[in-house]
């Protein structure tokens, strides 16, 4: 049970189930009209906290900035949307008690609260003091990780033509003529003076020979890198405004500060 001293800590606390599942953030605390005890708290749920549900505080436990309630997240989100006027009527409170399967403050089985008006009211209501608490909703924006695609390394083979200049050698025949002098005429002539004969020389040349050899040239790997972008999101938030409603007799006593 939440005490009066803990009301300030309840407002703004993060609401969890008893299993540790986050439900939302606590907003307004509603008091019992008769006893003044904390009776209900509204919890902002859904995307950006756009939905607001009533949760009973009778079995809630406050641990630091965590408010734990014995109800699952779906049950809280699907609770009846009541108290639009900032006050819970008896009928609305009975409906909430029946929804959560609880008995009312007097312990009756049907969730009734007796004949007296014990419906809850906002802690900034007229039965607290001369001041009002003005509240407003703020956007709570988070991120959710999802898979956007997959990347893989794939190796395939292509054929390209490379052109390389290769120096090659070849043999050619060149005729050299030496004049015969009187001194070497005897050595230059062997056999008949006039005859027919042949001399043969084998010529050679080099030709390019092309082979291929596979050699490693580089290693390629994939690495993930985080890139941060900025996206603009928007949502509707509600804000309370407080104005002075003067009566005819009090207008002359109004002082602006």
Image (spheres, rainbow, N blue to C red):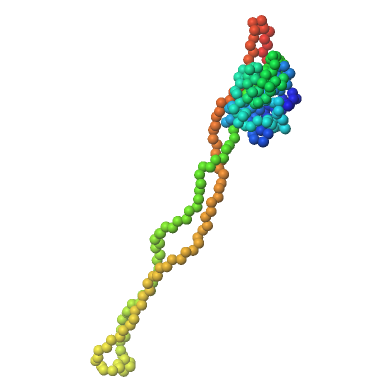
Q: Please identify the quarter of the rendering in which residue 111 is found.
A: top right
Can residue 61 be seen in the rendering of this structure? yes
| Residue at figure coordinates x 50%, y 44% from the top left | 149
Task: Give the image location of residue 103, x and y in percent.
Answer: 69, 23
Q: Residue at x 74, y 25 (%)?
A: 3
Q: Is residue 105 left or right of residue 168?
A: right
Of residues 154 and 185, the one nearer the viewer is 154
Along the viewing direction, whichever of 39 and 102 lies nearer the viewer = 102
Asked if residue 105 can be seen in this view, the reply is no
Q: Is residue 82 above or below residue 163?
A: above
Q: Position of residue 40 (x, y in %)?
A: 67, 23
Judged from this view, the residue extending furthest toward the top is 249
Q: Quadrant of residue 139?
A: top right
Residue shown at 67% from the left, 25% from the top: 102
- Depth check, front residue: 154 or 113: 113
* Image quarter of the N terminus: top right
In the displayed structure image, the side of residue 178 where residue 232 appears, left or right: right
Name the image quarter holding the C terminus.
top right
> Where residue 134 sits in the image (x, y, percent)?
65, 20
**Vertically, is 135 above or below 116?**
below
How many numbered dots are placed on residues in this image?
0
Q: Residue at x 24, y 92 (%)?
A: 194
Vertical position of residue 145 compared to residue 156: above or below: above
Instruction: Point out residue 250 in the picture as x, y percentages from the top left corner.
Output: 67, 7
> In front: 198, or 118?
118
Give the side of residue 175 with respect to residue 131, left or right: left
């Amino acid at each position: 049970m939440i005490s009066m001293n803990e009301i300030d800590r309840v407002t703004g606390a993060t609401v969890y189930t008893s299993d540790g599942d986050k439900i939302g953030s606590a907003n307004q605390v509603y008091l019992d009209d008769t006893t003044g005890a904390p009776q209900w708290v509204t919890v902002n749920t859904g995307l950006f906290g756009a939905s607001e549900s009533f949760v009973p505080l009778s079995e809630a436990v406050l641990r630091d900035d965590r408010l734990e309630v014995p109800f699952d997240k779906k049950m809280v989100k699907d609770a009846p949307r009541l108290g639009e006027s900032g006050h819970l009527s008896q009928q609305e409170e009975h409906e909430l008690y029946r929804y959560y399967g609880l008995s009312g403050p007097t312990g009756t089985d049907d969730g009734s609260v007796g004949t007296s008006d014990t419906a809850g009211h906002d802690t900034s209501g007229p039965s607290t003091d001369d001041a009002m608490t003005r509240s407003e909703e703020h956007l709570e924006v988070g991120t959710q990780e999802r898979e956007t695609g997959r990347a893989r390394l794939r190796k395939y083979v292509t054929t390209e033509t490379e052109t390389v200049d290769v120096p090659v050698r070849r043999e050619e025949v060149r005729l050299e003529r030496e004049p015969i002098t009187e001194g070497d005429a005897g050595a230059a002539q062997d056999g008949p003076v006039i005859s027919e004969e042949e001399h043969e020389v084998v010529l050679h040349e080099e030709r390019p020979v092309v082979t291929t050899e596979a050699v490693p040239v580089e290693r390629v790997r994939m690495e993930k890198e985080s890139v941060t972008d900025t996206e603009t999101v928007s949502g509707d938030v509600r804000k309370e405004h407080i104005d002075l409603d003067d009566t005819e007799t009090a207008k002359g006593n109004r002082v602006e500060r």
